[in-house]
């Protein structure tokens, strides 16, 4: 039990060093653009249905939750604004990122882990190439770009989901649902949503490529890498969520004062 | 050609190589025998810098490579080709691109020259008509031979084979052993072959090294090995005689 905390920080340090290596490679020896685009295309195509569905239902759930409270105060007109803002700022990015960690993260770490334990990564080095440049970088960049699109796409669909369930459960017509969204959702909400999507995409891409790249111990090792990827990504995202909310509040209060 | 001086390598608390001292002479075929998990693959990987030793020295062609950086190892890897225990082919590339990979990365070579060399290498391992296939579409034995061709195509001075014939049929095994022999005789290539097969070691090796639990327990020419008193070597010999 005592070993857990030092081990966590040790791992964190390792991941940071790996991220440093990846960024250094990106700076000095970038990979071919078509490799990145291939990954973007592949990941987006593979995960769009999942994230779209997650987004739709997250929006829907928030609407149903808020509908009960809002109706009590006779403020049904604000339902759209409230639920959209809450989705964008908190649950939306987080839940969709969880979905992605189970899908993109697990897939990538399994793929890289298999390449590692079947000596393909070693073979790349022996044949005179750099595995970080050839294999890691395209996936790293591809995942960041496509996760960002998927996350924002999912958030868009959460509005649709919210409006749909608003019609079904609260009897609000869609125009009314949408009308008050801009009233409640200011730029800070949108900005916070975007910052979160970006940082979760970075977390996901870093952790899954790291876990895959440092897999050891055969098929079992690949299994371990996949599980660690999902768990570590989710935990880090929750911690990040707290961190960004905290920082966001702090910044907002500064702006309010200044 | 290759010298190991008191090479030690551990993973965590487990010491896998416990002070290896070896001298591989140029042009020789050296067989490394040992039971599973004694660190044969680890020894080969240390040689080309895929793993780094904890202590001890490795000399290749008069250079002490122990402290080399990843960039410095590039020239060593051009000189010393390694064939892995797994076929380790790249799934997303065709067989042709797999074999051409090293030629493209290590050398800048004209496309028709690459083509010529790839075809030549494939015929060396008795394969043809698979250039446009993907690794998933050919059998394991064929994958292993393609993997051999991928390394041989670079025409390195030193070849490190990690169990090149494990899992192959007797005919292919024979042809690969002949290939190793002819590369060494014709091109004066130095070969280190990790294997479990004492019988074929006795047939084609110039020098045999037996490892046990990370240490050299016996070594010598096939003739000397036949006289060995070491129990593990006797077991291997017994096994070879029964085949
Ligand atoms: N990257 C690594 N990390 C941790 N342990 C390792 C690593 N590589 C090898 N080992 C350990 O080192 C030991 C020796 O492994 P090695 O692969 O060299 O065995 P081997 O002699 O090649 O056996 P085999 O004939 O089965 O291939 C094994 O116990 C293995 O678990
Ligand atoms: Mg081995």
Image (spheres, rainbow, N blue to C red):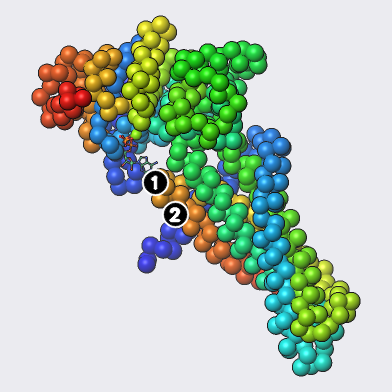
- What residue do we see at 17% from left, 23% from top? B241
Q: Please tell me which of labels 1 and 2 falls first in the chain.
A: 1
Residue occupied by mark 1 = A217
Q: Using the rendered view, name the quadrant where residue B180 is placed.
A: top left
Marker count (numbered): 2
Q: Is residue B10 above or below residue B65?
A: below
Q: Is residue B105 above or below residue A116?
A: above
Q: Position of residue B7 (x, y in %)?
A: 30, 30
Q: Position of residue A181 (x, y in %)?
A: 84, 75
- What residue do we see at 69% from left, 72% from top? A58
Residue occupied by mark 2 = A224
The chain to which mark 2 is attached is A
Quick one: SS at disc 2?
helix
Q: Residues within 10 Å of mark 2 (few under 14, many from 20)?
A: some
Viewer-proximal residue, A170 or B169?
Answer: B169
- What residue do we see at 17% from left, 13% from top? B223
Label 1 CB sits under 8 Å from any ligand 1 atom: yes
Q: Are marks 1 and 2 in contact (CB under 8 Å)?
A: yes
Q: Position of residue A71 (x, y in %)?
A: 78, 90
- What residue do we see at 58% from left, 29% from top? B133
Q: Residues within 10 Å of mark 1 (few under 14, many from 20)?
A: few
Viewer-proximal residue, A53 or A105?
Answer: A53
Task: Judge left or right: residue A154 versus residue B243.
Answer: right
Quick one: SS at disc 1?
loop
Residue at the extreme top of the image, as rendered: B186
């Amino acid at each position: 039990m005592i070993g857990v905390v030092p081990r966590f920080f040790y791992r964190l340090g390792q991941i940071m060093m790996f991220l440093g290596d990846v960024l250094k490679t990106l700076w000095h020896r970038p990979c071919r653009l078509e490799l990145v685009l291939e990954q973007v295309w592949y990941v987006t195509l593979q995960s769009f249905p999942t994230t779209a569905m997650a987004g739709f239902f997250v929006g829907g759930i928030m609407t149903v939750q808020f509908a009960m409270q809002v109706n009590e105060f006779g403020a049904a007109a604000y339902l759209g604004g409230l639920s959209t803002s809450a989705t964008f700022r908190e649950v939306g990015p987080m839940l969709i990122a969880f979905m992605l960690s189970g899908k993109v993260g697990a897939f990538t770490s399994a793929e890289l882990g298999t390449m590692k334990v079947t000596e393909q990564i070693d073979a790349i080095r022996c044949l005179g190439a750099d595995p970080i440049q050839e294999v890691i970088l395209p996936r790293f960049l591809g995942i960041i770009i496509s996760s960002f699109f998927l996350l924002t796409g999912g958030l868009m669909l959460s509005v649709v989901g919210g409006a749909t369930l608003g019609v079904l459960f609260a009897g609000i017509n869609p125009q009314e649902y949408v009308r008050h969204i801009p009233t409640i959702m200011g730029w800070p909400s949108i900005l916070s949503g975007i910052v979160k999507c970006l940082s979760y995409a970075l977390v996901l891409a870093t952790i899954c490529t790291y876990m895959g790249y440092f897999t050891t111990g055969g098929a079992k090792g690949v299994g371990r890498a996949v599980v660690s990827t999902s768990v570590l990504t989710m935990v880090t995202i929750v911690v990040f969520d707290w961190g960004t909310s905290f920082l966001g509040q702090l910044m907002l209060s500064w702006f309010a004062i200044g | 050609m290759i010298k190991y001086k008191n090479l030690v390598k551990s993973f965590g608390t487990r010491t896998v190589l416990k002070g290896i001292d070896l001298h591989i002479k140029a042009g020789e075929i050296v067989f490394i025998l040992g039971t599973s998990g004694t660190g044969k693959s680890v020894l080969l990987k240390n040689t080309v810098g895929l793993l780094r030793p904890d202590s001890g020295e490795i000399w290749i062609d008069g250079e002490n490579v122990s402290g080399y950086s990843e960039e410095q190892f590039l020239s060593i890897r051009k000189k010393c080709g390694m064939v892995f225990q797994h076929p380790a082919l790249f799934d997303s590339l065709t067989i042709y691109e797999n074999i051409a990979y090293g030629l493209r990365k290590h050398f800048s070579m004209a496309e028709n020259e690459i083509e010529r060399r790839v075809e030549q290498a494939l015929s060396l391992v008795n394969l043809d008509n698979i250039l446009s296939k993907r690794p998933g579409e050919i059998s394991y034995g064929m994958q292993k031979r393609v993997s051999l061709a991928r390394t041989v195509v670079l025409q390195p001075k030193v070849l490190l084979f990690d169990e090149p014939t494990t899992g192959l049929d007797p005919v292919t095994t024979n042809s690969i052993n002949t290939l190793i022999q002819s590369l060494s005789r014709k091109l004066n290539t130095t070969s280190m072959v990790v294997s479990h097969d004492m019988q074929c070691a006795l047939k084609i090796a110039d020098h045999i090294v037996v490892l046990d639990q990370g240490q050299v327990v016996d070594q010598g020419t096939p003739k000397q090995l036949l006289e060995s008193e070491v129990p593990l070597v006797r077991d291997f010999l017994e096994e070879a005689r029964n085949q």
